[in-house]
Structure formats: C-alpha cells, structure tokens
Image (cartoon, rainbow, N blue to C red):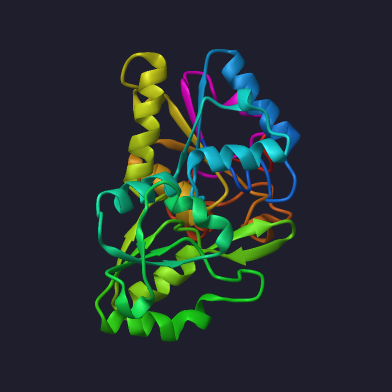
Amino acid sequence: MTSLRFVERLRDLVAGVDVVLSDIWGVVHNGLVAFPEACEALHAFRGQGGTVILITNAPRPADSVQRQLRKLGIADDTYDAIVSSGDLTRHFVADHPGRKMFWLGPERDNSIYRGLDPVLAPLEQADYIVCTGLFDDETESAEDYRGMMTQALERKLTLVCANPDIVVERGDRLIYCAGAIAELYRELGGEVIFYGKPHRPIYERAMSLAAEHHGHAMQLKRVLAIGDSVRTDLAGAHGFGIDCLFVTRGIHAEDFEGIDQLDPISVKELFGHPPRALTRELRW
C-alpha cells in the first residue's frame, strides 16, 4: 500500500458485499440531527439486496435505540436490525439474578434493566457495577470518578461497561462515555467486562442476525463494517476479520482536516491497521 484512498460513495465499495455492519452515532446521526445522505445510502444498499445491521455501543436495548432513531426521522427501512451493547449487558444482568448491582449512569439509561428486576444497591453493598455512562456527561469527566473507582477496587468489584466508547459526538461537542470510566478502573487494576465494539460478542450477535435474514451463515469476506472510531469501529472490524469503511467527519474529524491522501507512515500512525477506504461522509 502506497496510500489510503478516499471514496466518495458507498456504491463504489459494495460489489461482492452482502452485509453492512454500520455504526450509528457519527455515521447516521450526531446525537442531535440525522444525516439524510447516510440513511439514503444504507437504504439504497438494502434496495439492491444487501442486509444492514446497525451495531452500536449505546447502553440501551435495541428498541430504545430504534425509538431514538425514529425521533430523529430515521426510517425503519434504513436497516434490517439493531444490535446494541445495552442488549448484551442486559444478558449479563439476567444471568446474575439476586446479585446486587450498583448502577452508574444517567437516568435516561434506565431501560438497561427494564423488565429484569435487578437488586439495585449502593456501591458499598453491591456485588458488581454496571456502568452506562457518567451521571452528568455535560459537566463531568472520568477523573470525577477516581475516588469512586478506588473504593470499588478496594471491594474487588467487577465493572460491566455497557458502552466502551470513550467519547461521542453531541452536536459539535465531544461528550465522555462509560468507556472513559471503565478504562480508568482498568488502569487502577480493576476487573472490567466490556460489551460492545471493539469486542467480539456484538459482532457475533450481528452476524447471527444476518445469517437468520439470509437463511445461511455469511462469509466474512462479504461483510463491510462502517464507522468513525479507530478504537472501536476500526479495531473491532479488524479483530473480527472484516473490512472497514472509515468515516472521517466523526470523532476524528480534526485529524483528517485538509487531507486528501495519506502516506504509509501517516496511515500507520492514525490507524495501526488501515481500513479498506476512507470517506468524509456516508453517501450512496
């Protein structure tokens, strides 16, 4: 590879692709408004027989994610299914009945345990922690939780991270996510279980849904991931063995401002393992 190419349109990459695994936040919306051309691109891919599975590190069940998409005007026929890290976290909670859970996150994420009837407890009485985010992500950072994480470490609590993202776009700002607290806890020596990208379970679930849709197992060489995060989308796709189309206008927008071509050294510095191609924004 002498350079990493930019592509203008998704249709230039999907010959031989049966399944697209697309990130949501940063690719089809920014938390406040939808990106119509991105939605149109996914819809057009489906129109030619492809399957679109949205994979998201949202710490909420898929039906809650779908409601948010509808509020932003993103039609249900843009995709075939949604897989969220919130759903995978719910499986963990369901598999540990009777265990006391300390929930760390904003009230808007309470759907993470809806219908599970968990035993909620304060940190000093809990058996494990479920982290969906910061209590107030508008004003706080992970450092505000160092004392709490030190206390959790003293009790040797496992922290279940329902959103491995460090930051996410909210309009034109970057907001800290559960992954920032989880990484702090891991640095302190705590045990962390991550659900969501870049970890395998969310990809395995997405591929099982794609197989159900097609009626047979899918070949990884016929799958394309789309995302805007090196740490989650690109690393997750590489680790799972699938190609990735990287969207540059997301959380790494400043790194790519004014860049049209990347030399091999820059590619390695920015990506480690390079994506199949770059695009500024997803369009058909």
In front: 13, or 82?
82
Q: State the predominant SS element of the stretch in magenta.
A: loop
Residue at figure coordinates x 60%, y 71% from the top left = 136
- Work out whether 265 lies above or below 187: above
Residues in magenta, as a range: 2-21
Q: Does the magenta portion include 126?
A: no
Residue 209: x and y in percent read: 39, 27
Residue at figure coordinates x 26%, y 80% from the top left = 155
Residue 119 visible here = yes
Q: Give the total number of marks visible in the rendering.
A: 0
Residue at figure coordinates x 53%, y 69% from the top left = 134
Residue 241 visible here = no
Describe residue 40's horizontal placement relative to residue 114 as left or right: right
In front: 22, or 231?
22
Residue at figure coordinates x 51%, y 56% from the top left = 110
- Work out whether 4 lies above or below 186: above
Residue 204: x and y in percent read: 33, 36
- Residue 118, picture quadrant: bottom left
- Residue 96, picture quadrant: bottom left
Image quarter where the C terminus lies is top right
Residue 201: x and y in percent read: 32, 44
- Work out whether 140 lies above or below 53: below
Residue 253: x and y in percent read: 67, 56
Q: Does the magenta portion include 8?
A: yes
- Work out whether 51 lies above or below 181: above
In front: 59, or 228?
59
- Residue 153, picture quadrant: bottom left
